[in-house]
Amino acid sequence: MTVKSIPEGQHSVTPYLGIEGASEAIEFYKKAFGAVEMFRLPTPDGKVGHAELKIGDSSIMLADPCDQGPLRSSQSQTSGASVALHLYVNDVDAQFAQALKAGGKEISPVKDQFYGDRTGTLKDPFGNVWFLATHKEDLSVEQINQRAAEMFGNAKKG
């Protein structure tokens, strides 16, 4: 039997987050996004050395940062985020509300976008930015560019 270079159920790109308090982050992602914990490797001191979660049909990996590894916690940054995650869901309004109830903080409210998605942006309690979206319209690149030109053109006039 041939081993696949990309494991079954994984995609080519998987976000890997360094989060101080990874155990708490896992619980937040379960409550906010319905994440399923696939695997957790604890360190001798009880922190998360490595964990894999499934959200919808996609995976994320995370761990508590340590001095031996390259990951640094997004909470230690003074501004911005080291990683942002884009999550498509069936009902962005309901999922966004669930994430806020679980402890997320709204950055941008849910609204229809010119590119055919309905989106909202939030920051989780661990400093990571999430773009939640539901795809509403199939648009061509030309249609998206036209809408963008109209939107940004109107913004300059107003």
Image (cartoon, rainbow, N blue to C red):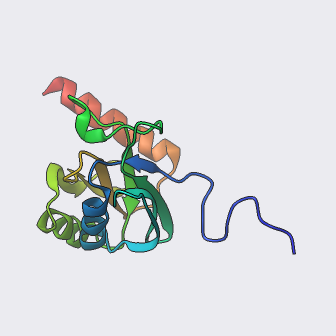
Point out residue 130 in the picture as x, y percentages from the top left corner: 30, 52
Q: Nearer the viewer, residue 114 or 104?
A: 104
| Left or right: 142, with 114 as reference point | right
In the image, residue 57 sits, relative to residue 42, either above or below, namely below
Identify whether 154 is placed above or below 115.
above
Q: Residue at x 32, y 40 (%)?
A: 73
Residue 22 visible within the image: yes
* Quarter holding residue 93: bottom left
Q: Residue at x 28, y 60 (%)?
A: 25
Image position, residue 136 (x, y; %): 37, 64
Of all residues, the one furthest to the top in this rendering is: 156
Q: Quadrant of residue 51?
A: bottom left
Q: Nearer the viewer, residue 87 or 116?
A: 87
Q: Quadrant of residue 47?
A: bottom left
Tell me the quadrant of the picture where the N terminus can be found: bottom right
- Determine whether, in the image, residue 75 is placed left or right of residue 5: left
Q: Position of residue 15 (x, y in %)?
A: 47, 50
Q: Does 58 sit left or right of 83 as displayed?
A: right
Report if residue 115 is visible in the image: no
Q: Position of residue 56 (x, y in %)?
A: 44, 72
Quadrant where the image shows the C terminus: top left
- Determine the residue located farthest toward the right in the rendered image: 1
Query: Which residue is at 38% across, 59% downward?
Result: 87
Comparing 85 with 46, the one in front is 46
